[in-house]
Image (cartoon, helix red, strand yellow):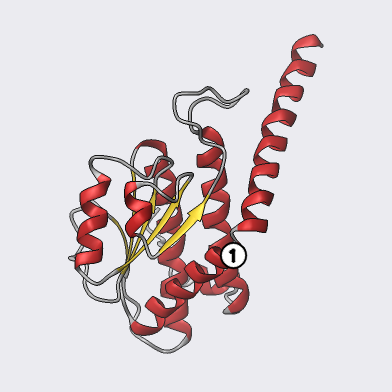
Amino acid sequence: MYKEDCSLKIVDIVADNTNTNAKQVGYFQEDNIEKTYELIMKCIENGSNIFFKGKGISGLIAEKAARRLIHLYQAILRKSGQKVEIRVFVIDESSTPKAKKDDLVIVVSGSGDKGTLNPLAKRTIESDAKLVLLSSYPDSTIGEIANIVVQIPGRILDKAESSMPLGTTFEMTADIVLTAINALIIERNNIAEDDLKAVHTDLE
């Protein structure tokens, strides 16, 4: 019984930590989240490409958001009678095309300063593509050149987080923010479950 109570307490702490962090982001970053949504919709309207990138677990969060957005992008194209194409990519996959003017690159990086991500961010700006950064540090190397920075508190370099190891709070909140943006796309574009099923793979 003690172990069960202890486990539930830990779950409550983690849930409360994440909920508090997500609400803070929502209150203080609403404009930047809205601007990110608008950039994504502009890409869909113009047929531009959207790229996602992160390292480590942040990379997995970015990849998850990309996978969801692939289907949303395709569903919108299908509803409008356009040709259904893949326009969302996870950078580093062999099928990733070259970034061009008016494309969008979304980077998830708690520090906003990674040796492998900094050159990518610079190339994004040089290509005249738009750059969005989800990070705890808006004044970081990437943050300084990004078009939009969605600041997500909770990641403190070299300091442990209570019950949340390393950058867990940042990663979980970044996941919530990206999921919320996809939810906005669904809600504002009247995308139904059947619309998503129509473009989802059946080769499973």
Above or below, 41 against 177 in this view is below
Above or below, 112 against 26 in this view is above
| Badge 1 amino acid | Ala
Q: Picture quarter containing residue 47?
A: bottom left
Q: Depth check: give the residue in front, 179 or 76.
A: 179
> Looking at this rendering, what residue extends furthest in the bottom direction?
81
Q: Depth check: give the residue in front, 150 or 8.
A: 150
Q: Considering the numbered disc 1 on the image, is that residue within a helix, a strand or a loop?
A: helix
Q: Picture quarter containing residue 122?
A: bottom left
In the image, residue 121 lies at what x, y percent? Answer: 27, 55
- What residue do we see at 40% from left, 40% from top? 111
> Looking at this rendering, what residue extends furthest in the top direction?
2
Q: 43 left or right of 198?
A: left
In the image, residue 142 lies at what x, y percent? Answer: 33, 51
Q: Depth check: give the residue in front, 88 or 169.
A: 169
- What residue do we see at 43% from left, 41% from top? 110
Q: Residues within 10 Å of mark 1 (few under 14, many from 20)?
A: some
- What residue do we see at 40% from left, 65% from top? 70
Above or below, 140 against 34 in this view is above
In the image, residue 85 lies at what x, y percent? Answer: 31, 75
Residue 127 at least partly seen: yes
- What residue do we see at 51% from left, 51% from top? 151
Residue 200 at least partly seen: no
> Can you identify the residue that label 1 sits on?
183
Q: 50 left or right of 76?
A: left
Above or below, 35 against 9 in this view is below
In the image, residue 192 lies at what x, y percent? Answer: 60, 73
